[in-house]
Amino acid sequence: MAMAPRPSSLEEVHFLHEVATLACSGSELDEVLGPLLRLMSERMRLHRAGLALIDRAQGTIALRAAHGLTPSEVKRGRFRLGDGLVGRVAATGTPEFAERDEPTRSFVAVPIERRGRVLGTLGGSRPLTDARSLRQDIVVLSIVAALMAPTVEAFCDQSRGMAEDHTRYQPSGIIGKSKTMSSVYELIDQVASSSTMVLLRGESGTGKERVASAIHGHSKRARAPFVKVNCAALPETLIETELFGHERGAFTGAHQQRKGRFEQAHGGTLFLDEIGDLSPSTQIKLLRVLQEREFERVGGSRTVRVDVRVITATSRNLEQMMEQGGFRADLYYRLNVFPIHLPALRERKTDILQLANHFIEVCNRSHGRHVRRIATSAIDMLMAYHWPGNVRGLENCIERAVLLARDDVILGHHLPPTLQTADASGTLPSEGLAARVDVFERELVLDALKSAGGNRAKAARALMITERIMGLRIAKFGIDPKRHRQGR
């Protein structure tokens, strides 16, 4: 079997320059890992590339991120110190390689060290190669590990400090590790154990319901009901009976007594979404319930007392509504005890890829698909888009792409037309049918070459065209197959 060729010395210099630029960018580790591992995969011809961190308290080393693995595979990537190649490298601080880790793959890993302390490992698998090439890989990876060591150390120290004072955690069901979301998690942690009223602010689709659910789930009321009401989805004639219930005969069609959402949530939490859409008359009744903890059902005279924690949310400017007389000031101050602002997706772009991978897994399970990755061109489009629909818009976009994908990869043309602009995709101008076809065709050729490791014949077979036509398309689009060569 032919051994995999190595990158040229000049390519390695360019690669290390890009790594140094990333390392000196001042970004946090999780913001750097995606671009770093993608660079390693593309420039070092690695099939999989991963960075793992040591957990001394548990005596383990776990993957923090990996290129070429699904999120679920990354979660399973945990080893005991000393076990296996990665575990030995972490325990001894000595680089190691395996010429034949799999039938067609070699593997190499180096320690990440800082001030005499091993923090983790960096490595990956590549097409089968010899010991001499793997030793050269160790040299290059050791330089990369040294460049990244300060960023890794800062992350480990920060994580350890956060764990010690218990002020940082990530609620289950919420995806994202950006700085802005970390601030949200801290606020959730601070307010969850109390009965304080919370007002969630933010654009539509930013995940206000999930945050409300997280607050309830981490509170003393977690075993009691969590009841949700979307105030914007109900007409004014129904919202009052929905919230407070009604007595039998209160109006035409009221054949029996019905408990409202306040009674249903007794002992637990009531989440009122889009609170800014309540009518003035309903605002008055809501204010009374919040102050007195009691109300009467529609058509009734008996006072009902409830013990409910109320969490509200809005995407509207309540302050402006108060000035215009659309929202009561006394209700606003009653609700706005502990405000939490949820950032728009465009303000937390480092979370986009993690969210997208999560939605891929969800859609794979619900639709019986097997999508494993997102093509680079599609990633660029996702990162460049301004996401007016926020996380909900991204979820819908990924579901559409999973359904359209014919193979195990999401390509740029699987994304909605709103994302497929020259600015967003980095493609040629798409005026007219011919230009659009060229963009589509170039993307197919690029992905086929990448999957085939730069092998023209194999890529041509995958696209069911002749090698001659493949050569013509490569020349037409100015593609360099060597950039995708992995060796066979």
Image: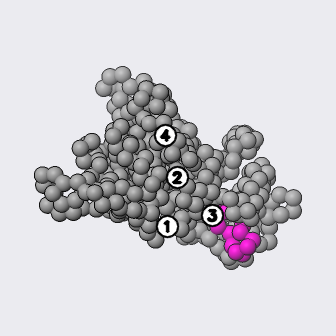
Q: Nearer the viewer, mark 1 or mark 4?
A: 4
Q: Measure the C-alpha gap from mark 2 to mark 4.
A: 14 Å
In the structure shown, which secondary structural element does the residue marked by tag 4 occupy? helix
Disc on res. 330: 4
Residue ID at (25%, 57%) = 300
Disc 1 designates what residue?
221
Disc 2 designates what residue?
197
Type of the residue with mark 3: Leu
Q: Measure the C-alpha gap from mark 4 to mark 3.
A: 51 Å
Q: Residues within 10 Å of mark 1 (few under 14, many from 20)?
A: many
Q: Nearer the viewer, mark 3 or mark 2?
A: 2
**Quadrant hosting residue 64:** bottom right
Going from the N terminus, do you reach mark 2 or mark 4 first?
2
Going from the N terminus, do you reach mark 3 or mark 2 first?
3
Q: Is residue 361 visible?
A: no
Q: Nearer the viewer, mark 1 or mark 3?
A: 1
Type of the residue with mark 4: Asp
- Residue 332 lies, with reference to residue 251, above or below; the image says above
Residue ID at (42%, 29%) = 325
Query: In the rendered image, which quarter contains the N terminus?
Result: bottom right
Q: Main secondary structure of the magenta part?
A: strand
Q: Residues within 10 Å of mark 4 (few under 14, many from 20)?
A: few
Q: Measure the C-alpha gap from mark 1 to mark 3.
A: 35 Å
| 295, 310: nearer the viewer | 295
Type of the residue with mark 2: Met
Q: Position of residue 122 (x, y in %)?
A: 69, 59
Look at the image and give the residue range highlighted in magenta. 45-64
| 420, 199: nearer the viewer | 199
